Image (cartoon, rainbow, N blue to C red):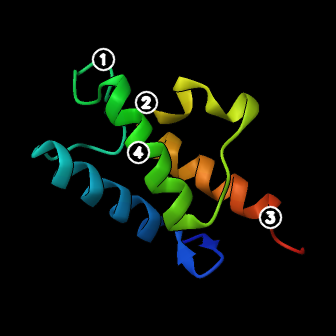
């Protein structure tokens, strides 16, 4: 299933996030792997990930969206990006 996310599909967002994680952790992750439970992401790296997501996708992650659960898996991060981009659209 391909869902449009502005100028990026869901799959493209997921691939980009997985690439960023792989590059920075030198590990390949499944989209549904709990990155924190597996020791793949520290709290410091989570901040780098937050900045990366905001700058790459032109969104601002604030308030309740700063919940750690939104960053546990690539699937959850992708869903967060989609939702926040949708909230920022004029439709």
- Residue 65 as seen in the image, left or right of residue 70: right
- Give the alpha-carbon distance from disc 2 to disc 3, as whole Å: 23 Å
- State yes or no: discs 4 and 3 in contact (Cβ < 8 Å): no
- Give me the residue at 15% from left, 47% from top: 28
Mark 4 / mark 1, whichever is N-terminal: 1
- Within 10 Å of the Cα at label 4, are there few (<14), some (14-19), or many (20+) other Cα atoms? some
Question: Where on the picture, by quarter, is residue 37?
Answer: top left
- Give the alpha-carbon distance from disc 4 to disc 3, as whole Å: 20 Å
Residue that label 3 marks: 88
Residue that label 1 marks: 37
- Within 10 Å of the Cα at label 1, are there few (<14), some (14-19), or many (20+) other Cα atoms? few
- Give the alpha-carbon distance from disc 1 to disc 3, as whole Å: 31 Å
Q: Position of residue 19 (x, y in %)?
A: 25, 60
- Give me the residue at 48% from left, 50% from top: 51
Q: Nearer the viewer, mark 2 or mark 3?
A: 3
**Residue 1 appears in view:** no
Mark 1 / mark 3, whichever is N-terminal: 1
Mark 4 / mark 3, whichever is N-terminal: 4
Q: Position of residue 60 (x, y in %)?
A: 68, 52
Q: Which mark is residue 49?
A: 4
Quarter of the figure that contains the C terminus: bottom right
Q: Residue furthest left?
A: 26
- Residue 39 as seen in the image, left or right of residue 8: left
Residue that label 2 marks: 72
Q: Is residue 91 above or below residue 59?
A: below
- Give the alpha-carbon distance from disc 2 to disc 1, as whole Å: 8 Å
Seen from the viewer's position, the closer of residues 21 and 51 is 51
- Give me the residue at 23% from left, 21% from top: 38
- Give me the residue at 22% from left, 21% from top: 39
**SS under mark 1:** loop
Q: Nearer the viewer, mark 4 or mark 3?
A: 4
């Amino acid at each position: 299933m391909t869902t449009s996310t502005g100028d990026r599909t869901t799959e493209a967002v997921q691939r980009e996030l997985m690439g960023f994680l792989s590059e920075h952790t030198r590990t390949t992750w499944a989209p549904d792997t709990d990155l924190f439970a597996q020791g793949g992401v520290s709290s410091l790296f989570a901040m780098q990930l937050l900045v990366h997501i905001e700058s790459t996708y032109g969104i601002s992650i604030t308030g309740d969206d700063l919940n750690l659960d939104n960053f546990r898996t690539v699937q959850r991060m992708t869903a967060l990006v989609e939702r926040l981009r949708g909230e920022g659209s004029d439709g």
